[in-house]
Image: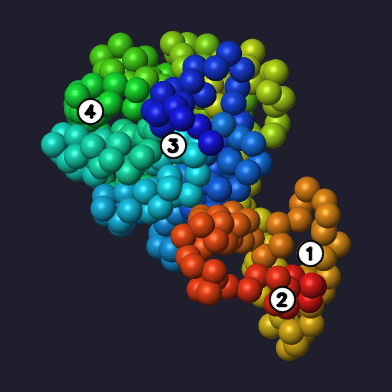
């Protein structure tokens, strides 16, 4: 458990001398997993969070919906949470409320993009950018709110200059340099670049901290190599199997017309027993823990009201 304020802890991750691997997911249990695995921060994805709720990543979710989800995610772990805040959800006054709401939610920092509303998911067709002046205004509104409420809260300026209509590496770099010079943004985030060669050029031309992201780039460079390039963090979308493997099991059940694929999966779970892959049914990631509940009952309830924890069937013995 960390006693460091979320913003200060997240800022230390971005300012580390070595590229930090940051698990990237969509649910409170994912932030708990990241902490249990020993990582120093967790990134709450905007797109994945929307998809896991059955909603497209098209800017349809409201600020309050996104913040409520972020609050639950932050409560599930003690490591700092870094969140996607889309375009800031409106005019400068809305951007300032966005910063305030995320701070109040216990989040360590957010990124704000320079897309025109309604935004598009990063890297897809149809992305358009706001003017330089509007992007600068968004970021400065966010920075002023940060400075008033929590100076450690991290503001990341995301540019979609690479993937926008008429954009490219040069436009992304131009925007990044502009945001560094004209705003109080703490970090630059290049979205959607296709190669590490493009990222290397962008990072070289941009005062740090900065980082570039594309799914196809993840895992193609070592931490030492990324550190040498100036990559501040490397988000890792470890929850992707939560879509693909779940779909595989569901499709297998439908194709077979039987529940037997589920039994086979339980057998594979059982094979992990006693190893570091063993999480049972996942209860270990919940709060409060079952051990804590038992301890509080023993501490505060009279003996006559306490439950019998020693004479019950252990459900996990069945797999």
**Mark number for residue 269?**
1
**Mark number for residue 311?**
2
Measured Cα–Cα span from mark 4 to mark 2: 52 Å
Residue 3 percent across, percent down from the top left:
46, 30
Identify which residue, 65 or 152, lies in the foreground. Answer: 152
Measured Cα–Cα span from mark 4 to mark 1: 46 Å
Q: Earlier in the sequence, mark 3 or mark 4?
A: 3
Q: Nearer the viewer, mark 2 or mark 1?
A: 2
Identify which residue, 283 or 17, lies in the foreground. Answer: 283
Which element type, helix, strand or loop, lies under badge 2?
loop
Residue 242 location, quadrant: bottom right
Which element type, helix, strand or loop, lies under badge 4?
helix
**Mark number for residue 199?**
none
Residue marked by disc 4: 149
Q: Earlier in the sequence, mark 2 or mark 3?
A: 3
Residue marked by disc 3: 82
Q: Earlier in the sequence, mark 4 or mark 2?
A: 4
Q: Left or right: 188 with respect to 185?
A: right
Identify which residue, 75 or 191, lies in the foreground. Answer: 75
Q: Residue furthest front?
A: 303
Q: Are marks 1 and 3 in contact (CB under 8 Å)?
A: no
Residue 268 location, quadrant: bottom right
Q: Are marks 3 and 4 in contact (CB under 8 Å)?
A: no
Residue 39 location, quadrant: top right
Residue at left offset 70%, top offset 31%:
220
Q: Are marks 4 and 2 in contact (CB under 8 Å)?
A: no
Residue 187 percent across, percent down from the top left:
41, 22
Q: Left or right: 32 with respect to 56?
A: right
Q: Does any portion of residue 191 appear in the rendered image?
A: no
Which element type, helix, strand or loop, lies under badge 1?
helix
Q: Are marks 4 and 1 in contact (CB under 8 Å)?
A: no
């Amino acid at each position: 458990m960390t006693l460091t304020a979320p913003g200060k802890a997240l800022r230390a991750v971005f300012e580390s001398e070595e590229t930090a691997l940051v698990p990237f997911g969509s649910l409170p249990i994912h932030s708990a997993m990241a902490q249990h695995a020993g990582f120093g921060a967790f990134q709450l994805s905007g797109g994945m969070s929307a998809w896991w709720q059955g909603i497209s990543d098209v800017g349809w979710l409201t600020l309050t919906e996104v913040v409520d989800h972020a609050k639950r995610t932050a409560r599930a772990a003690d490591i700092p949470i870094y969140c996607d805040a889309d375009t800031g959800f409106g005019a400068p006054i809305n951007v300032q409320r966005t910063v305030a709401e995320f701070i109040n939610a216990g989040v360590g920092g957010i990124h704000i993009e320079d897309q025109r509303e309604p935004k598009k998911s990063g890297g897809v067709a149809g992305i358009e950018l706001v003017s330089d002046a509007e992007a600068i205004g968004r970021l400065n509104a966010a920075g002023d709110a940060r400075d008033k409420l929590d100076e450690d809260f991290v503001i990341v300026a995301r540019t979609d200059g690479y993937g926008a209509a008429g954009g490219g590496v040069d436009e992304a770099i131009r925007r990044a340099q502009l945001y560094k010079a004209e705003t109080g943004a703490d970090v630059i985030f290049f979205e959607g670049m296709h190669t590490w060669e493009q990222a290397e050029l962008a990072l070289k031309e941009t005062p740090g901290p900065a980082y570039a992201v594309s799914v196809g780039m993840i895992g193609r460079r070592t931490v030492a190599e990324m550190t040498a390039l100036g990559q501040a963090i490397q988000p890792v979308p470890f929850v992707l199997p939560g879509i693909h493997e779940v779909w595989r099991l569901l499709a297998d059940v439908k194709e077979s017309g039987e529940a037997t694929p589920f039994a086979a999966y339980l057998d594979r779970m059982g094979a992990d027993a006693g190893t570091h892959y063993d999480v049972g049914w996942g209860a270990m990631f919940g709060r409060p823990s079952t051990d804590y509940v038992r301890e509080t009952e023993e501490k505060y309830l009279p003996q006559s009201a306490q439950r019998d924890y020693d004479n019950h069937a252990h459900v996990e013995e069945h797999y």
